[in-house]
Image: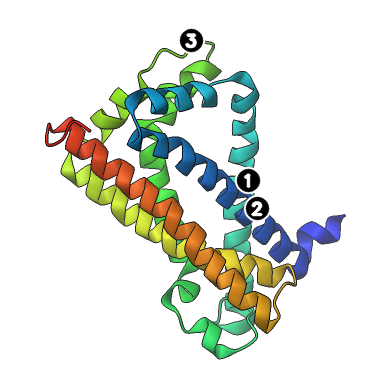
Amino acid sequence: MANIFTSSIGKKLIMSVSGLFLIVFMCVHAFVNGLSLISNEAFNAGCEFMALPIISVMVPVLAAGFVVHIVYAFVLNCMNYKARGTQRYAVPNKAQTDDWASKNMLVLGIIVLGVLGFHLTHFWAKMQLPMFLGQEYTHDGAALLHQTFKQWWVVALYIVWFVALWLHMNHGFWSAFHTLGLNNNIWMKRWKVAGIFVSSVIVLVFIAVAVKGYLVANGICCC
């Protein structure tokens, strides 16, 4: 069991599995946020569902997934720098290291993590944290969303975050399956297409939510 956490292969497997776990969470998050594109009532219903005790107990699990992924990201990057210099990911040929994202996964991860802290102050700290402190869920999720995205610079910062998230997930998706051994020529092409599709849908939903929130908050549209 110790080898799983300390061996090079074990660390890569943990990194891959935790990354896929977080992508699944992002799919759920995008679905709930996407309800705001339908109506305020639909989004508030989604927020109330996420506030249920059975869902709230998953928050520590999610937090643990983030911590594990971040810790092992730094550990693996240190190992890769020592072993291979600037080549950060073990892939079967150089062509797969030519894209910018694969060479800057740590930088992208730091950007994602940095803005994540900013994001948590907007929603988690105002909605879920009070519940952990024993208070009732009383927030109007749609009103809070519109209030958050009322300033254009907040929307711009979030879009930069979403782009970094897209690049990080896009590469991380197929890289995870490569690490798990599903890396022959046929499946790698499929994983790359699937990664582009999944990450694009997630990020486009997030961007649409932010832009609509800005438009509604500033009276530009009432949709």
- Circle 3 Cα neighbour tier, 10 Å, few/some/many (<14 / 14–19 / ≥20): few
Contact, mark 2 vs mark 1 (Cβ under 8 Å): yes
Instruction: Name the disc covering residue 18, or none.
Output: 2
Residue 31 lies, in percent from the top left, at 48, 40
Q: Earlier in the sequence, mark 2 or mark 3?
A: 2
Left or right of 160: which side holds 125? Answer: right
State the SS at label 3.
Answer: loop
Quarter assignment of residue 117? top left
Residue 214 lies, in percent from the top left, at 20, 38
- Give the farthest residue toward the bottom: 94
Q: Which residue is mark 1?
A: 65
Q: Considering the image in quadrants, where does the N terminus appear?
A: bottom right
CA–CA distance between discs 2 and 1? 6 Å
Left or right of 212: which side holds 12? Answer: right
Q: Earlier in the sequence, mark 2 or mark 1?
A: 2
Q: Nearer the viewer, residue 178 or 1?
A: 178
- Residue at x 37% of width, y 53% of height: 204
- Residue at x 50% of width, y 74% of height: 102
Name the amino acid, label 1.
Answer: Gly
Instruction: Name the disc covering residue 136, or none.
Output: 3
Q: Earlier in the sequence, mark 1 or mark 3?
A: 1
Residue 86 visible in the shown view: no
State the SS at label 1.
Answer: helix
Q: Considering the image in quadrants, where does the C terminus appear?
A: top left
- Residue at x 12% of width, y 36% of height: 220
